[in-house]
Amino acid sequence: MSEKMYIVSCTQDLEKMGLDRIRMKVEGMEARDLSLDWTQTRLIPVVANEKVPFNVGEMRILNIKPIKIPANSIVLQSFFGVNGMGHITCIGSTEFQVIDQDRIADKAMFQSRIKAAVMSGDILGQVLIVTST
């Protein structure tokens, strides 16, 4: 029997409903072994799909051009900077998705170090997608 584990969903849309987060019990998130095939690694740019204004130090979730993530693949952030305005901290979606299914990332959390707007088409960062064998 697995221990109780919860995912926490936080989006700006929840604030409109008077909530700061939603906690949901999940299964299938236990530790697992993966054999990674680095020959199948892809470096993919994370590209904004909307214009979003930022204040200094502000962190927001924004829409990105969808990124396909194959089942049993992991996503690693490339720390080589490609956006002088700030950095992505994660990518994903508003729906919980398990690793053993194909997934789509269409959201990114971005933190700006300056007061400026991210424009549609701006590269926010890069990720590596590594497929399991």
Image (tube, rainbow, N blue to C red):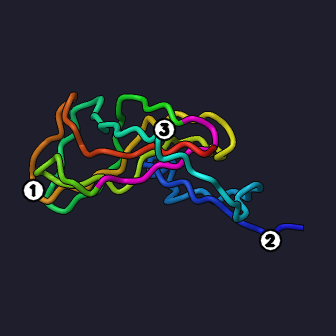
Q: Secondary structure at mark 3?
A: strand
Write the residue at 29% across / 51% down. 110
| Residue that sits furthest to the front in the current view | 39
At mark 2, the secondary structure is loop
Crowd band around label 3 with a 10 angstrom C-alpha radius: few (<14), some (14–19), many (20+): few
For marks 2 and 1 on the same chain, the one whose residue lies earlier in the sequence: 2
**Amino acid type, callout 2:** Glu
The one nearer the camera, 93 or 21, is 93
Mark carried by residue 40 = 3
Q: Is residue 55 magenta?
A: no
Residue 49 shown left or right of residue 74 in the figure: left
Instruction: Identify residue type, mark 3.
Output: Gln
Real-space CA distance between mark 3 and mark 2, rounded to the nearest whole angstrom: 33 Å
Residue 104 visible in rendering: yes
| Residue at x-position 9% and y-position 56% | 114
Residue occupying the point 9% across, 53% down: 115
x then y, percent, for residue 104: 52, 33
Looking at the picture, does residue 39 appear above or below residue 30?
above
| Camera-side residue of 128 and 54 | 128
Q: Position of residue 54 (x, y in %)?
A: 18, 49
